[in-house]
């Protein structure tokens, strides 16, 4: 049977098989706030030390929307037009063409379904083949086993360790720095 998708995509910027990515909007603030405050997600990828308020999220979205070196993209499921997370890319005007990426699939029911892989792959294709970006950098807590495995599966290489740069459950932990060069990325 053919998959039924929600008929209209809302302002798509990158379209993939099961999802599309569109620029963040003020109306996304409450979803993002929930993900940033979620105790389990905070352990995996912390946004800030303090509780995320709607006002701060809205300010952040406004600032990102005005920024000339940042792409803040919501990952939307085509099937029901629901946001499941975001991918954020900074330093897009860097002279070394090295950008910083951060992603959260905040809807945990969307984990383990290749949605994250599909969305990240499409963003990497956009960065490497449309924007001519040379490398993508990101950091992951050493305690976040799922993300470590995910980024390695996506081809990222472990490049360094930020020793005891993360504090969790009363203990310091390392942050693993990852990088991916365009020549290492394999288009599907
Ligand atoms: C990291 C994230 C994007 C990955 O998306 P996902 O849909 O969960 O990823 P996948 O299921 O495709 O891949 C995760 C891999 O880790 C494995 N895994 C899951 N839980 C694990 C655990 N506790 N220990 C080790 N490996 C684990 C999975 O089996 C899978 O490997 P496989 O493809 O070989 O089976 C998503 O989980 C997320 O947004 N997490 C919260 C935010 C975050 O951690 N962001 C990253 C920091 S920038």
Image: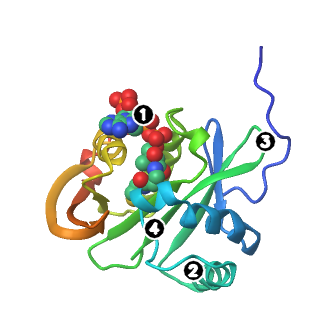
How many numbered badges does the structure rendering display?
A: 4
> Which of the two residues, 116 or 142, is positioned nearer the viewer here?
142
For marks 2 and 1, give the CA distance. 30 Å
Kindly state the secondary structure of the residue where label 1 is placed: loop
Which residue appears at 15% of the width and 57% of the height? Answer: 159
Which residue appears at 26% of the width and 68% of the height? Answer: 166
- Please name the residue that numbered disc 2 is placed on: 64
User: Which numbered disc flags the more N-terminal residue, 4 or 2?
Assistant: 2
Between marks 4 and 3 in the image, the one whose residue lies nearer the viewer: 3
The colour scheme is: rainbow
Q: Is residue 78 left or right of residue 65?
A: right
Question: Residue 163: where, in percent of width, then height?
Answer: 13, 67
Which residue appears at 28% of the width and 52% of the height? Answer: 143
Between marks 2 and 1 in the image, the one whose residue lies nearer the viewer: 2
Between marks 4 and 1 in the image, the one whose residue lies nearer the viewer: 4
For marks 3 and 2, give the CA distance. 26 Å
The answer to whether residue 126 is visible is no
Kindly state the secondary structure of the residue where label 3 is placed: loop
User: Which numbered disc flags the more N-terminal residue, 4 or 3?
Assistant: 3
The numbered mark at residue 1 is none
Question: Residue 27: where, in percent of width, then height?
Answer: 77, 70
- Please name the residue that numbered disc 3 is placed on: 80
Mark 3 near ligand 1 (CB under 8 Å)? no
Question: Residue 151: where, in percent of width, then height?
Answer: 33, 46
- Please name the residue that numbered disc 4 is placed on: 89
The answer to whether residue 18 is visible is yes
For marks 4 and 3, give the CA distance. 25 Å
- Please name the residue that numbered disc 1 is placed on: 188
């Amino acid at each position: 049977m053919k998959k039924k998708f929600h008929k209209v995509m809302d302002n798509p910027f990158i379209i993939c098989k099961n999802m599309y990515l569109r620029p963040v909007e003020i109306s996304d603030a409450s979803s993002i706030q929930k993900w940033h405050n979620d105790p389990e997600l905070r352990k995996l990828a912390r946004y800030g030390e303090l509780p995320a308020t709607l006002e701060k999220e809205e300010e952040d979205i406004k600032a990102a929307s005005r920024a000339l070196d940042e792409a803040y993209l919501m990952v939307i499921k085509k099937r029901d037009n629901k946001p499941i997370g975001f991918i954020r890319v900074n330093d897009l005007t860097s002279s070394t063409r090295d950008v910083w990426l951060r992603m959260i699939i905040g809807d945990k029911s969307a984990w383990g379904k290749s949605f994250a892989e599909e969305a990240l792959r499409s963003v990497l294709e956009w960065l490497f083949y449309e924007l001519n970006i040379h490398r993508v950098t990101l950091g992951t807590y050493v305690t976040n086993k799922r993300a470590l495995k995910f980024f390695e599966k996506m081809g990222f290489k472990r490049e360094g360790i930020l020793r005891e740069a993360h504090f969790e459950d009363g203990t310091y932990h390392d942050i693993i720095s990852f990088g991916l060069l365009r020549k290492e990325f394999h288009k599907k």
